[in-house]
């Protein structure tokens, strides 16, 4: 095997370090600056030098070459040739010495001379080493000479002929360096490297055949997909319109109802389709399915136009009330948000037998909480009701503390609280106060009959519940003002309709005697900074006739 040895001592050359190879020239023969003879079929070093020096590589591209780590032979993957070590790595000395000479080359001419005069010692991993070093050398030259198409083709053919012996890592590095050096992306070199790269990659499995689904099955597939919220409403409407009646199963309609409720989609066509399905399939539906079908109507505050909707639900409640207590109360909760509570069902759920029946169940607390809210709705909204009521000892706070979603998702509560603190003072408002029978208020103010904002600590912050029939006879003349944050997610999507639970809370607080001051999210989002927000709050409070500070008392 040929060995490397240093040349006799002499003055250093301007071209590069003084070394000679034992090769075709014979043992001990000194290497000339440019070799006249070269391997058959390979371009001469002069042509390679002209090509690489004339590559239209910008300084940005060439600077990218400086960031690439040196290519190590042992890092390369296995080669397709069995007579070499993995990655085309060298066996011993001369090949390793060639890599060291390539990495230490001081000029493109010296770099290409090491490649051109020793074709038998060049391995696959030498090409990315040479390209990287070439990029570093060219990066130091501000204006490379113009490219010659013939020599560019010569260099491309040289790498194309040898790239079948490259492993995947070498191909990837050479491809990246070729692009950085300015070789065209649609040229033969880049195309050949990309083709070899594709041959090394494992074949992709064919995509599974998607069966052609009809309307109902397509609707079910869309709603069952984890990313079904990306399907627009018109896709659901079209699938629903194309579905045959026998394809619309309770499972499909429940998925549709849950989709609308979860994403606050107040789509009348889809809601009317659910209402029609409920009426048409009344005999086959139990209360556990009905509670899921009715959920979007209450949440989205939508009363369907289907005339048989309410009579159908009353019949289902009369038939299924004693079978599933929690489902029965859930249905009544949705109807409570729609202000359509049936008296007959209220008589049943407030009866002593129903209350004693649910006392020992795992969901007794949640049922009692819902019954307490229903009792509040009867007190405030159904003055003509004369049936049984929930006993006082069975009543529990509806929402004993702010909801987790309120604390986590409320975008403007903190900045509004800071604005009120600077505007009024900490003692003149209360935040997140739960008032009887269990509604949480965002901000509560106590106001005198003259409009002065009073310190909350000196006043009873609650209004009496149940409300007195003659409010003017009360000993407490102070009025309660509740600032209600109306965030974007408090509304149905793409609309100005409050969600059913939000509308119910505001309606009941107003009926109990609290004066509501809504703060819409559009107005809050338009305020830029705390000074503008304080000015906005001042205008809102003054519009109600409120006074504070030295002039307010």
Image (cartoon, rainbow, N blue to C red):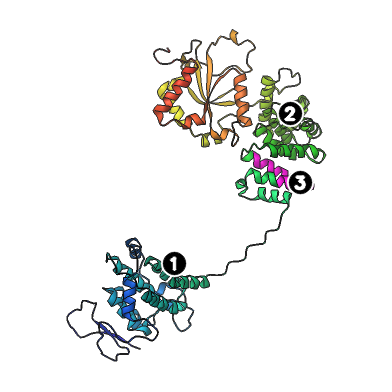
Q: Nearer the viewer, mark 1 or mark 3?
A: 1
Out of 11 and 347, give the one closest to the viewer. 11
- Left or right of 312 on screen, residue 111: left
Determine the main secondary structure of the stretch shown in magenta.
helix
Q: Residue 201 location, x and y as percent?
A: 52, 70
Mark carried by residue 249:
3
Q: Is residue 98 above or below residue 410?
A: below
In whole angstroms, how far apart are the C-alphas of marks 1 and 3? 55 Å
Q: Examine the structure image and report whether residue 255 is included in the region drawn in magenta.
A: yes
Out of 371 and 422, give the one closest to the viewer. 422
Quadrant (top left, top right, bottom left, bottom right) of the N terminus: bottom left
- What is the crowding at mark 1: few (fewer than 14 residues within 10 Å), some, or many (at least 20)? few
- Left or right of 491 on screen, residue 536: left
Q: Examine the structure image and report whether residue 511 is included in the region drawn in magenta.
A: no
Residue linked to disc 1? 185
Residue 397 makes an appearance in the image:
no
Quadrant (top left, top right, bottom left, bottom right) of the C terminus: top left
Q: Which residue is pictured at 24% across the width and 78% down the height?
A: 17
- What is the crowding at mark 3: few (fewer than 14 residues within 10 Å), some, or many (at least 20)? some
Out of 499 and 452, give the one closest to the viewer. 499
Helix, strand or loop at label 2? It is: helix
Q: Quadrant of residue 240?
A: top right
Residue linked to disc 2? 355
Q: Is residue 461 above or below residue 504?
A: above
Q: Residue 289 location, x and y as percent?
A: 74, 40
Q: Which residues are magenta?
A: 239-260
In whole angstroms, how far apart are the C-alphas of marks 1 and 2? 78 Å
């Amino acid at each position: 095997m040929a060995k490397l040895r240093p040349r006799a001592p002499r003055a250093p050359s301007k071209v590069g370090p003084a070394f000679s190879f034992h090769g075709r020239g014979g043992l001990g023969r000194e290497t000339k600056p440019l070799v006249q003879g070269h391997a058959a079929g390979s371009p001469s070093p002069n042509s390679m030098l002209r090509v690489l020096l004339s590559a239209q590589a910008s300084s940005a591209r060439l600077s990218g070459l400086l960031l690439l780590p040196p290519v190590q032979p042992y890092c390369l993957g296995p080669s397709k040739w069995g007579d070499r070590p993995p990655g085309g790595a060298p066996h011993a000395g001369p090949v390793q010495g060639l890599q060291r000479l390539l990495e230490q080359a001081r000029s493109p001419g010296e770099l290409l001379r090491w490649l051109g005069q020793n074709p038998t010692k060049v391995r696959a991993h030498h090409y990315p080493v040479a390209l990287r070093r070439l990029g570093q050398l060219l990066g130091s030259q501000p204006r490379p000479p113009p490219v010659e198409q013939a020599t560019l083709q010569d260099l491309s053919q040289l790498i194309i002929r040898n790239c079948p012996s490259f492993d995947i890592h070498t191909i990837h590095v050479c491809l990246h360096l070729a692009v950085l050096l300015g070789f065209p992306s649609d040229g033969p070199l880049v195309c050949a490297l990309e083709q070899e790269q594709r041959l090394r990659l494992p074949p992709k499995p064919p995509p599974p055949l998607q069966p052609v689904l009809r309307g109902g099955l397509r609707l079910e597939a869309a709603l069952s997909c984890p990313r079904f919220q990306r399907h627009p409403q018109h896709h659901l409407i079209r699938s629903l319109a194309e579905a045959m009646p026998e394809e619309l199963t309770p499972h499909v309609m429940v998925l549709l109802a849950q989709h609308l409720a979860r994403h606050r989609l107040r789509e009348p066509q889809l809601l009317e389709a659910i209402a029609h399905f409920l009426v048409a399939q009344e005999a086959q539906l139990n209360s556990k399915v009905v509670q899921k079908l009715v959920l979007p109507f209450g949440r989205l505050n939508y009363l369907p136009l289907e005339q048989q909707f309410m009579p159908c639900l009353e019949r289902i409640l009369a038939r299924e009330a004693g079978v599933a207590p929690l489902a029965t109360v859930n249905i009544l909760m949705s109807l409570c948000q729609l202000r359509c509570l049936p008296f007959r069902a209220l008589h049943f759920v407030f009866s002593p037998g129903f209350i004693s029946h649910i006392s020992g169940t795992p969901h007794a607390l949640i049922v009692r909480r819902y019954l307490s809210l229903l009792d509040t709705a009867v007190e405030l909204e159904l003055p003509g009701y004369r049936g049984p009521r929930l006993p006082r000892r069975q009543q529990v706070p509806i929402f004993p503390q702010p909801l987790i979603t309120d604390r986590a998702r409320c975008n403007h509560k903190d900045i509004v609280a800071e604005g009120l603190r600077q505007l009024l003072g900490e003692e003149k408002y209360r935040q997140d106060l739960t008032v009887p029978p269990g509604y949480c208020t965002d901000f509560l103010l106590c106001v005198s009959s003259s409009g002065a904002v009073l310190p909350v600590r000196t006043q009873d912050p609650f209004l009496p519940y149940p409300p007195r029939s003659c409010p003017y006879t009360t000993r407490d003349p102070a009025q309660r003002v509740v600032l209600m944050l109306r965030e974007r997610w408090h509304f149905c999507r793409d609309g100005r309709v409050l969600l059913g639970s939000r509308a119910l809370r505001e309606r009941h607080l107003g009926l109990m005697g609290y004066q509501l001051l809504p703060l819409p999210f559009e107005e809050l989002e338009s305020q830029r900074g705390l000074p503008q927000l304080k000015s906005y709050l001042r205008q809102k409070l003054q519009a109600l006739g409120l006074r504070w500070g030295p002039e307010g008392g």
